Amino acid sequence: MKKLIYFLTGILAITVLLGVTAWRMSAATGVSTTTNSLTIFNWGEYIDPQLLTKFEKESGYKVNYVTFDSNEAMYSKVKQGGTAYDIVVPSEYMVQKMAKENLLLPLDHTKIKNLDYDNPKLLDAAFDPKNTYSVPYFWGTLGIVYNDKYITHPPTKWEDLWSKDYKNSILLTDSSRDVMGMGLIATGSSVNTTNQSEINRAYDKLLQLTPNVKAILGDEIMSYMINNETPLAVVYSGQASEMTSSNEHLHYVVPTRTNIWYDNLAIPKNSKNTKAAYAFINFMQEPENAAANAEYVGYSTPNVKAEALLPVEVREDKAYYPDEALIKEDEVYVNLGPYWTGVYNDLYLQFKMNK
């Protein structure tokens, strides 16, 4: 019995010692899981890692960086509430959805610096009037990358992808809204339609595209294109930037009518450190930091002062910083609501199964 008591006493002493040691280490570094840390929930490879290090050094906050691969995955995690994220990066329609469901904290603009550095055309958007819940992070377009080793007459609009010349040649990005959007635009409808006849017509059009679809993929699209393994891919502009810089035979086309998207910084309602969240938003609003981030990630910065710091060949590239005339007919996705989102998703899954 005495041996057991000694053993248990020893275990208790070790536990206390480890706890004290951990507390001392935390105190020495100024880090705790509540007041001295910032948990960011962002898309994969969507920030310059050096900026996270710089933020930690300048602010004293320890960054916990967690990634997701879709708006829906991020939404589910935030809604479940198991983890308290301090910053999330939803796209436009998801900002609208999360705000409606009371999952985002209304922003105190008195705590945000340099919001006037952002392009006025990207502020006060329909999905978030007066930027009540979000601050622009990146923006871009959905378009087509083609390889000039295989393609001599590149597509200029979505309808061109239905050409018999592209049989078993196209990689599609795995996204319900994007693929359904292609079908809707190709049949003359809005990417946000809730007209069942228009949606059905778009689905039927997509079924006709099936012979041309080589695969439906995620980020691995980039390696396939960079390695000259397929002629065409439907991708986001930032992905295209990385691909075209890695392979001189690749080129990015912005279709005459497409989706223009915005990703945004927002603070979830259950954030445990809003002070750190505002510090990070302000850090990313600094032109030097926003420019470094844009160069690293390859997407378009909304910060006009940051844009001015980019290399001339980048900021004058009309594929990534297009003139207003080129994108005037482009559409931003809006939140369709549970019913119509389900309709889109169900038809998209049927399309994938058909492939």
Image (cartoon, rainbow, N blue to C red):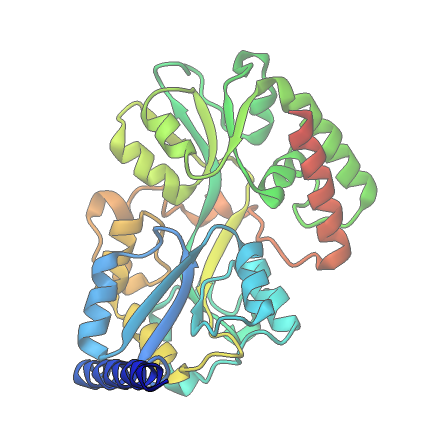
Q: Is residue 3 above or below residue 294?
A: below
Residue 63 in view in this figure: yes
* 57 and 304: which is toward the camera: 57
x and y, in percent, of residue 177 in the image: 61, 45
Q: Is residue 12 above or below residue 187?
A: below
The residue furthest front is 1
Quadrant of residue 40 within the rendered picture:
bottom left
x and y, in percent, of residue 38 in the image: 35, 74
Q: Is residue 91 above or below residue 22?
A: above
Q: Is residue 83 left or right of residue 192?
A: left
x and y, in percent, of residue 238 in the image: 37, 44
For the point 56% across and 39% down, the residue is 257
For the point 35% across and 49% down, the residue is 299
For the point 32% across and 77% down, the residue is 37
* 141 and 107: which is toward the camera: 107
For the point 72% across and 34% down, the residue is 350
The residue furthest right is 197
- Quarter occupied by the N terminus: bottom left
- Quarter occupied by the C terminus: top right
Q: Is residue 30 left or right of residue 354?
A: left
* 264 and 29: which is toward the camera: 29
Residue 36 in view in this figure: no
Q: How many numbered marks have been drawn onto this rendered protein structure?
A: 0
Q: Is residue 105 left or right of residue 265?
A: right
x and y, in percent, of residue 116 in the image: 36, 74
Quadrant of residue 5 within the rendered picture:
bottom left
